[in-house]
Amino acid sequence: MGKYFGAHYGNIDNLGWLQSRGFNEVGYVIHYGSAIPSPAPIKNAWMVATLNIFNDGSDAPSQMFADGGQFEGYFSAIANAGWDMIAGEGCTTSVIDSVQKYLPYVNYGGDQANNMYASPWGHPNTGKGHLDYIETYTAGNCVNNVGGVSGCINAAQAAGALHLGILIGDWCLGTDPGVYINIVDSTGCDTICFWGGYGQPSSRCQGLADVLIGHYGAAKWSGGGTPPGPPTPPAPPPSQIPDWALKFSSMSGIDITQYLTKKYDGQPTPGRHTITIVPGDGTAHIDVHVRVKENQPSKK
């Protein structure tokens, strides 16, 4: 079964590649309070668009102990800009509850295999749907406590995460892919997310991502944020129906031979005749072509 792949970076420099490889979600990492960018490039590529605004207390340092109400204007503006989800780390339940008045919340956590649901960290349990991405690195190293990482994933499952999976740090891209495969397979998580942070180019994840996508295959989901489908083609312009047009209740009531150009003797004029049939709503038309041959006298 395919896994859901995400890439959270401050510089999305390979959007076309992410789309071509079947990535499900793209997260754009900014500093809290920055101007809100447009999610259109991500959504037009049919991927879920996540805006990451809280990162381990480095932005809005009071977030870990704050009343979430002070941020609601920003959260509302992000939702109104068209983003599908808001992501962060180290936030109180109050902050997370405030986020989820507007959008689903993506929760990062588990560094050093600690309990990301213990105080002061909050659990996104408001019922609107949340995601948990568990950091596979510990104390700045790469996967040196597989048991602890698995424990965090199991805790997230028990807490009712809508989607959950591993978070691979950009500095860990050289790790043996088998280590990540072991964690995913042993826990049953459904998501693999690459994290690069401020300013880092998302193209850095391509090598390891190719290996893991080749192993699992890539899937798409519609919970949390729904990536747009192909644009609906515009309807054809309405046909102009002249005032003199005749109206019929059904196609079976039309005898087109009555409306062909006639000669002086009442017979149809030889050559090609075209009759336009337009439905009553004027949205389309059918051109009926009839070719009439001259009657030849019989030879005796």
Image: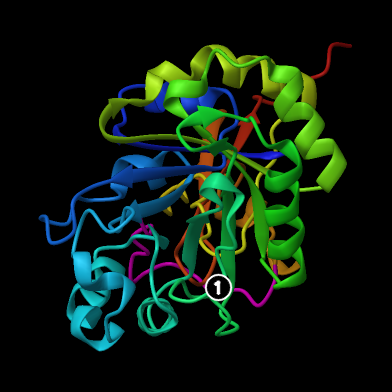
Q: Estimate the x, y position of residue 69 in percent, counting from the top left.
A: 25, 88
Which residues, given as a range, are shown in magenta? 237-250
Amino acid type, callout 1: Ala
Residue drawn where x is 51% and y is 55% of the image: 109
Q: Is residue 250 left or right of residue 286?
A: right
Q: State which quadrant residue 287 falls in.
A: top right
User: Where does residue 254 sit, x and y in percent of width and height?
Assistant: 68, 63
Q: Quadrant of the N terminus?
A: top right
The question of residue 140 being in magenta is answered with no
Predominant SS of the magenta segment = loop
Q: Quadrant of the C terminus?
A: top right
- The percent position of residue 70, horizontal first and vertical second, equals 19, 84
Is disc 1 surrounded by few (<14), some (14 to 19) or many (20+) residues within 10 Å?
Answer: few
Q: Secondary structure at mark 1?
A: loop
Q: How many marks?
A: 1
From this viewpoint, is residue 1 visible?
A: no
**Left or right of 290: which side holds 123?**
left
Give me the residue at 53% from left, 75% from top: 124
Question: Looking at the rendering, which quadrant does residue 146 occupy?
Answer: top right
Name the residue tied to disc 1. 118
Is residue 176 shown left or right of residue 182? left
Q: Is residue 219 left or right of residue 269?
A: right
Give the residue drawn at x 46%, y 71%. Answer: 121
